[in-house]
Image (cartoon, rainbow, N blue to C red):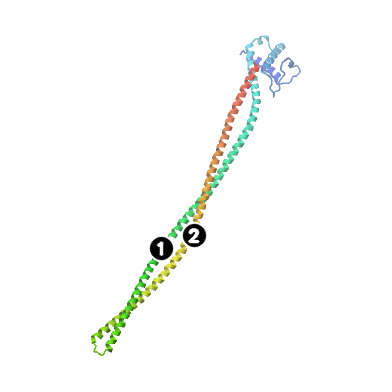
C-alpha cells in the first residue's frame, strides 16, 4: 500500500460514518443521490451491494468537491482493497444479524423444550430419591425385624434347652417311680409269702400242740424224749413265726418309705410337668412371633426389591432425560451452525 493510502482510507471511512451513523446536517452531501438511505444503527439493514454503490458515489462526490485528486482515484487496487475490507465487515454484520434472528427462534424453541426435559429430569430424580429414602427406611425396619427374629430364636433356643432339662428330670423321676413301684411289688410279695409261711407254721404248731396233749393225756407211758422233741419243734416254730413277723414289720416300714418316696417323686413330676407346660407355652408364643417377624421381614425385603427396581427404572429415565438434553444441545448447536451457513450463503448471493 502506498504512503497516501491512509488519506484515502480515512476519507472513505469518514464518508461511511456520514452515511450510516449521523443524521443529515446542513452542507452535508445529499443522501437522496444514493439508492439506499442511511440505516439506523440498531437495524443495520444496508445491503452489501447498496453499500458498495454508495461508497462509489461518495468517492465521486469527494472528487467533485476536491477532497480527492483524480490521480488518487486511478489507484484502483487500493480502492478495491478498502472496498473489499468494508464489504467483508458488512457481510459479517449482516450474517450475524440474520443468524441472530434465526437463533432467537431456535433459542426460544430450545428453551421451551429444554424446560420440559429438565422438568422430566427433576421429576425422575425426585422419584428416584423418594425410592432411595423408602429403601433406607425399609432397611432400618428390616434390620429391626432381623434383631427381633434373632432375639426370638435365642429365646426359643434357651426355653427349649430348659424344657429339655425339665423333661429329662421328669423322665428320671418317672424311672425312679417305676423302680420304686417294682420294689414295692417285690416287698408286697415277700410280705405275703412270709404271712403265708406263718400261717403254715401255725397250722403245724397246732398239730404239734394236739400231739403233745395226746401224749400227756395218754394212759400209756410216753417217752420223755418224744415230749422233748415236740417241745423243741413247737419252740422252733414259734421262734420262726416271731422272726417272720419281725421281717414283715420291716418290709411294711420299707413299703411305707417307698410309698412316701413315690408320692414325693410323683409330686415332683407334677411340678416339673407344670413348669414344662409353661415353657412349652412360652416357646409356642415365641414361635408365633418368630413366624410373624419372618413374614414381615420377607414382605419388607420384597418391597425393598421392588423399590430398588423402581429406583433403577427412574434412574434410567433420569439418565435418558439427561442424554436427551445433551443430544438436543448438540442438535441445536448444529441447527445454529446451519443457520449461520445459510445466512452467509444468502448474504453472499445478495452481495454478488
Which residue sits furthest front?
219
Which residue lies at the image location 43% right of the left edge and 61% below the top edge? Answer: 167
Q: Nearer the viewer, residue 166 or 184?
A: 184
Q: Name the residue: 57% across, 30% down.
A: 327
Of 330 and 198, the residue lying toward us: 198
Q: Position of residue 160 (x, y in %)?
A: 45, 58
Q: Residue at x 27, y 82 (%)?
A: 233
Above-or-below relation of 90 to 330: above
**Secondary structure under badge 2?**
helix
Residue 319 appears left or right of 271: right
Residue indicated by mark 2: 281
* Relative image position of residue 249 (x, y in whole percent): 36, 77
Label 2 or label 1, whichever comes before in sequence order: 1
Residue 88's spot in the image, x, y percent?
A: 63, 18
* Left or right position of 111 against 315: right
Q: Identify the residue position indicated by label 1 in the image.
A: 171
Mark 1 Cα-neighbour bin, 10 Å: few <14, some 14–19, many ≥20: few
Element under disc 1 = helix
Residue extending farthest right: 26
Quarter occupied by residue 12: top right
Question: Quadrant location of residue 237?
Answer: bottom left
Q: Quadrant of the N terminus?
A: top right
Q: Are marks 2 and 1 in contact (CB under 8 Å)?
A: no
Left or right side of 231 for 341: right
Foreground residue among 68 and 130 = 130
Amino acid at each position: 500500500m502506498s504512503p497516501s493510502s491512509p488519506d484515502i482510507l480515512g476519507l472513505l471511512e469518514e464518508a461511511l460514518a456520514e452515511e450510516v451513523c449521523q443524521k443529515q446536517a446542513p452542507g452535508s452531501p445529499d443522501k437522496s443521490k444514493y439508492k439506499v438511505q442511511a440505516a439506523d444503527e440498531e437495524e443495520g439493514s444496508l445491503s452489501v451491494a447498496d453499500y458498495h454503490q454508495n461508497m462509489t458515489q461518495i468517492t465521486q462526490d469527494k472528487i467533485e468537491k476536491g477532497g480527492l485528486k483524480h490521480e488518487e482515484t486511478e489507484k484502483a487496487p487500493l480502492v478495491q482493497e478498502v472496498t473489499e475490507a468494508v464489504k467483508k465487515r458488512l457481510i459479517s454484520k449482516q450474517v450475524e444479524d440474520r443468524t441472530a434472528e434465526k437463533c432467537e427462534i431456535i433459542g426460544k424453541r430450545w428453551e421451551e423444550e429444554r424446560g420440559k426435559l429438565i422438568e422430566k429430569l427433576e421429576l425422575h430424580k425426585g422419584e428416584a430419591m423418594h425410592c432411595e429414602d423408602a429403601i433406607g427406611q425399609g432397611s432400618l425396619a428390616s434390620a429391626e425385624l432381623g434383631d427381633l427374629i434373632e432375639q426370638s430364636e435365642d429365646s426359643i433356643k434357651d426355653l427349649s434347652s430348659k424344657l429339655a432339662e425339665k423333661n429329662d428330670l421328669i423322665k428320671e423321676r418317672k424311672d425312679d417311680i417305676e423302680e420304686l413301684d417294682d420294689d414295692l411289688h417285690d416287698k408286697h410279695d415277700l410280705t405275703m409269702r412270709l404271712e403265708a409261711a406263718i400261717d403254715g407254721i401255725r397250722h403245724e404248731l397246732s398239730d404239734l400242740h394236739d400231739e403233745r396233749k395226746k401224749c400227756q393225756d395218754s394212759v400209756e407211758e410216753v417217752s420223755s424224749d418224744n415230749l422233748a422233741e415236740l417241745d423243741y419243734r413247737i419252740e422252733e416254730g414259734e421262734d420262726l413265726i416271731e422272726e417272720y413277723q419281725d421281717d414283715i414289720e420291716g418290709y411294711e416300714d420299707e413299703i411305707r418309705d417307698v410309698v412316701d418316696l413315690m408320692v414325693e417323686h410323683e409330686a415332683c413330676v407334677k411340678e416339673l410337668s407344670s413348669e414344662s407346660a409353661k415353657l412349652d407355652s412360652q416357646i409356642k408364643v415365641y414361635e408365633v412371633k418368630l413366624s410373624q417377624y419372618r413374614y414381615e421381614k420377607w414382605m419388607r425385603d420384597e418391597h425393598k426389591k421392588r423399590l430398588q427396581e423402581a429406583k433403577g427404572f427412574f434412574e434410567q429415565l433420569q439418565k435418558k432425560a439427561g442424554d436427551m438434553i445433551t443430544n438436543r444441545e448438540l442438535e441445536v448447536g448444529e441447527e445454529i451452525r446451519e443457520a449461520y451457513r445459510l445466512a452467509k450463503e444468502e448474504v453472499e448471493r445478495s452481495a454478488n
